Image: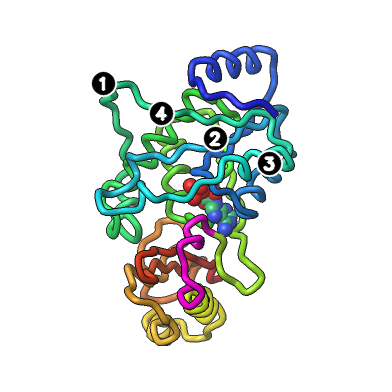
Amino acid sequence: MRTIADKAVLHADMRARRARGETIGFVPTMGFLHRGHTSLMDLARHKCDHLVVSIYVNPLQFGPDEDLDRYPSDPDGDASKCRTAGVDTLFLPPDLYEPDHSTQVTVDGLTEGLCGAARPGHFDGVTTVVARLFGIVQPSLAVFGEKDYQQLAVIRRMVRDLSMPIDVVGGPLIRDEDGLALSSRNAYLSPDERRRALSLHRALFGIRDGTETAAHHRLAVARDVLDVDRIDYLSIVDAESLQPLDTIDRPARALVAAWMGQTRLIDNVAVD
Ligand code: AMP
């Protein structure tokens, strides 16, 4: 595995590979890697000739009061996990944007609810950085986790609407043995917060296993299960459009975002 920091060097190398007919797979991350990330690398590894992983904590997707300045990092651990996962190129750009960067990518509609409502501007930051990374890496395949279910839907929409020649693949949400969705932000949790955070997946699995077709019944039960400091949202939405459902009569997704102290956690599950 080689490490490249310079975006122009990476771009030139990727162009040469594409010209030789190599397929490039790509997994963008913000580092502090765990099994959720490496599961995406495993998925991509089998589908491409050359696998690129990027680690970049993108300031554009953080709000002014969010955790950009304390986002966890572990460069040596990350490199070793990437090596074990068979990554060919680890892309570690110190910055991504030109000093006079002035282009923003916005996906409307899908970004209005859920995390888009709770974190204004967040998805503009995500689509802008992913579009930038796609331009540099030029992958034929990019893998994103269902952990960030709305993000995956937004990226698919961007790729479709802008005719980007990239196959977007979703990887399943990976959980710890006790059910907690793996997240770099779990590192912030105290032992008590971590224990109470298990209520997120319990609430969601309760919704999944419920029998009432009225969404508000299942949501009321789930809200009682949640043992958190604050709820940003707890919703049952159409799995494609992400519009809230009154009646669960089609493939749906239950999603939650909640705060444990200073830590915001998200989780979701399919409701079929
Ligand atoms: P992040 O480093 O948090 O920006 O995440 C990078 C990628 O890893 C995104 O596509 C996430 O959806 C994905 N990811 C993060 N946690 C998990 C998880 N527990 N299971 C599956 N994918 C994940």
Mark sitting earlier along the chain (4/3)? 3
Read off the residue under disc 3. 80
- According to the picture, the residue beneath numbered tag 1 turns out to be 100
Disc 1 within 8 angstroms of ligand 1 (CB):
no
In the rendering, which numbered label is found on residue 95? 4
On residue 198, the disc is none
Q: Which residue is mark 2?
A: 54
Residue drawn at (61%, 27%) of the image: 3
Q: Can you give x and y, in whole percent of width and height, for residue 267 in the image?
A: 48, 65
Left or right: where does residue 87 sit relative to residue 64? right
The residue tagged with tag 4: helix, strand or loop? loop
Who comes first in sequence, dot 3 or dot 2?
2
Pick whichever, 44 or 64, lies toward us. 64
Q: Tag 2: residue type?
A: Ser
Instruction: Tell me the CA gap for discs 1 and 4.
Output: 13 Å
Return the disc, 3 or 1, that comes first in the chain's sequence. 3
**Total marks placed:** 4
Which residue is depicted at the point 42% across and 32% down?
A: 131
Specify few, some or many for label 4: CA neighbours under 10 Å numbering under 14, 14-19, or 20 or more.
Answer: some
Type of amino acid at the residue the image marks with label 4: Asp
- Of the numbered discs 1 and 4, the one sitting upstream in the chain is 4
Report the mark closest to the observer, 3 or 1.
Answer: 3
Q: Amino acid at mark 1?
A: Asp
Mark 3 residue crowding within 10 angstroms, few (<14) / some (14–19) / many (20+): few
- Residue at point 63% right, 17% down? 18
| Dot in front, 3 or 2 | 3
* First to last magenta residue range: 183-193
Ligand 1 within 8 A of label 4's CB?
no
Q: CA distance from mark 3 to mark 2?
A: 14 Å
Question: In which quadrant of the rendered image does the C terminus lie?
Answer: bottom right
In the rendered structure, are the residues bearing label 3 and label 2 in contact, judged by CB atoms less than 8 Å apart? no
- Looking at the rendered structure, the secondary structure element under dot 3 is helix
